[in-house]
Each structure stands twice: as structure tokens, then as C-alpha cells.
Amino acid sequence: MHTIKSWFWPGVITIALLTALAVWFLTDPIDRELTASVNDGLALQNDWASAEIDGRDLVLKGIAPSEEALAAALKIAGETEGVRIVDNQTTLLPLADPFSFVVTKSDEGILLSGNVPYGDARAKILAAAENAMPGIEILDEMAVARGAPQGFFNLVDFALAQAAQLTNGEVEISGTTYNIRGTAANLNDYDRLNAAFHTALPGNAEAGEIKLEAPARASSN
């Protein structure tokens, strides 16, 4: 028995180590290949999702901008050859209902707040704000969310154009309703602002609260 023990256990340990090493060197490249394959597929349609592989089990991570985007990512992951199980650890962006956007103009500059869709929407809105009100400092406090109404960028462009005619105040989009409060820069802007909110608004939007004041100098005449 002593003789058997002297060679048996070292032999078992050696075999176990060799097996572990073989599994390590054989499966790790497979993991890397599967991970690269899935992530390449995801990158074609999604820039929010990422995948990790453990054996042949896939973990999908990220914050999905929409339910449709999540379904597409799950389809890509599930249809990748070699993947056995997809563990969905993604989350959805919060849904804003109503989806809001606010332009606040003051002596300090322009504050953009409320909600902004996922993607390049933030950059587009900031560029539009700079174009509408050049030379004014812009502070960005927009939060990414789901639920933007159809034609959202047209709504935003209109809001920025009206805010440009205020000395101070705010233009708010709540769903597809415009609210405006503040003081017009001059009498012509006061007339234009009132006219703009009493005509057809972009995206079938409607006017809500309209509280406009004429500039102090004009109102005192």
C-alpha cells in the first residue's frame, strides 16, 4: 500500500494539472473567439451593448436605448454560432412620460435641461443652440431617456428660435405641448413670439401656458 501511495497520488495530481492546463489553453482561445464574434456582430447595429463569454455561456451587458434595440442585441447574441446560453444583464433607459425639454435663458447664459434621446441627439441640440444664440454660454443638464415624441428635433429647433427672442425666461416642451414664460428682447420680438404661438406649431404640437411680457422700456411708453 505504501508503494502504491508513493506513485499513485503524484500521478493523479500530475494528470489533474495537465487536464486543467489543457482545458485552460483550449477553451480560453474559444472564449476569446466567441467574445470577438458576438461583439463584432453587436457593433454593426448597436453601440451600447457588450458581451462576455464564459465557456459557451454569454453575458450581455449595457443600457439599451429602446426595447427594439434590446431585442435586436439579444437576437444577435442568441444566433451567434457556439453560444449556448444568453444571460441578459442589460437594462433599459428610463422612460420619460411626458418627455420634456426646457430652454432657460438668463443673464448667466442658456441652460438646457429636461430629456434628450440616446445617441448623437445631445451634440445636435447643443450645436443648434449655439447656432440660435451665438456667443452665449450654454450649460447642459439634459438627461438621456426614452419616450421622445415624433419630430422631436423640429420641436427643439422651434423652442430654441423662440428662446433667442427672450432677454430672460424659458421655453418648455412637455410631450408635444409648448409653454413659454419670460420677457421679450424688444417689441418686435414680443409681437413675433405671440404670433408664433398662435399659428400652426411644428410636429402637430399645441400651445400651453403663454406668459410673455413686453420689454420694460416698451411697456412704459
Image: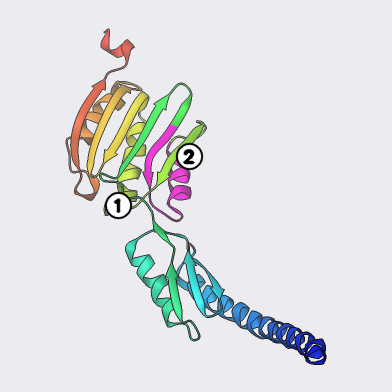
Give x and y (percent) for residue 68.
Answer: 33, 66
Tell me the tag on residue 147.
1
Give x and y (percent) for residue 88.
Answer: 42, 67
What residue is shown at x 29% (from left), y 21% (from top)? 187
- The quadrant in which the C terminus is found is top left
Front position in the image: 50 or 4 = 4
Calculate the distance from the C-alpha at mark 2 to the C-alpha at mark 1. Answer: 25 Å
Of helix, strand and loop, which one carries label 1? loop
Q: Is residue 83 above or below residue 188?
A: below
Give the left or right position of residue 173, taking residue 17 as reference: left
- The quadrant in which the N terminus is found is bottom right
Q: Is residue 146 above or below residue 51?
A: above
Give the left or right position of residue 213, taking residue 89 as reference: left
Give x and y (percent) for residue 33.
Answer: 60, 81
Q: Amino acid at mark 2?
A: Glu
Q: Earlier in the sequence, mark 2 or mark 1?
A: 2
Q: Is residue 137 above or below residue 154?
A: above
